[in-house]
Amino acid sequence: DGGITQSPKYLFRKEGQNVTLSCEQNLNHDAMYWYRQDPGQGLRLIYYSQIVNDFQKGDIAEGYSVSREKKESFPLTVTSAQKNPTAFYLCASSRGRVDTEAFFGQGTRLTVV
Amino acid sequence: SQQGEEDPQALSIQEGENATMNCSYKTSINNLQWYRQNSGRGLVHLILIRSNEREKHSGRLRVTLDTSKKSSSLLITASRAADTASYFCATDKGSNYKLTFGKGTLLTVNP
């Protein structure tokens, strides 16, 4: 089945630890995105990538890092520098052209314990 | 920065009624899209309307776009309990194809 897969679904992190969230797509999409969603809030863009080996900061990139070594994969690392990492993280992909829709994964819920 | 703002924040209706949600945005756009999110899940694309279009239909969904007022509305007709979800508008502007989302409208359809 074609789609976008995020793992794990739930993730617990101790304070001071880095954690990496996985996002894989087999839709042959050029563009990939990471969003953060807090309770009752909309989606805020963390990072996005329009092509392999290139990515740009979104609105709330501080404390996060990404890589785009393969077209299919866009992992997000939440570093210890992110002061309030508890949130729901959503990965999306699109063809990266005008007037195209985004496809979302099912999300990873990260909790700091 | 959030480009779109949905109104109302929450809407509760009875099954069979129509639901209307509004979205306002601030700058010129290429297109405006509506997405649905069931609780704790990812978003699902519903409909896209281009900046040169005024109205679009898809099944029980009707979307309008008024670029002079920088606003859009999503109408869901003959609502069902299964329509209960959060609905987000998203705008695509510029040349980097990134979507900017609003805070959403939580729709509750009571059986």
Image (tube, coloured by chain):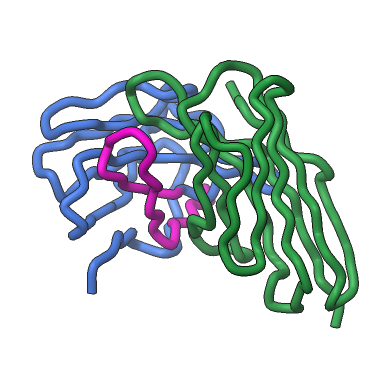
Chain colours: A blue, B green
Residue B98 lies in quadrant: top left
- Position of B10 with respect to A36 (left or right) is right
Image position, residue A80 (x, y; %): 40, 32
Q: Quadrant of the C terminus of chain B?
A: bottom right
Residue A104 painted magenta:
yes
B84 vs A63: above or below: below
* Residue positioned 68% across, 39% down in the render: B103
- Position of A83 with respect to A51 (left or right) is right
Image position, residue A45 (x, y; %): 46, 32
Which residue is farthest bottom? B111
Residues rendered magenta in the picture: A90-113
Image position, residue A19 (x, y; %): 33, 45
* Residue positioned 44% across, 57% down in the render: A107
Whether residue A44 appears in this view of the structure is: no
B64 or A10: which is nearer to us?
Answer: B64
* Residue positioned 23% across, 55% down in the render: A24
B9 or B35: which is nearer to us?
Answer: B35
- Position of A75 with respect to B18 (left or right) is left
Question: How many numbered badges does the structure rendering display?
Answer: 0
A94 or A83: which is nearer to us?
Answer: A94
Residue A17 lies in quadrant: top left
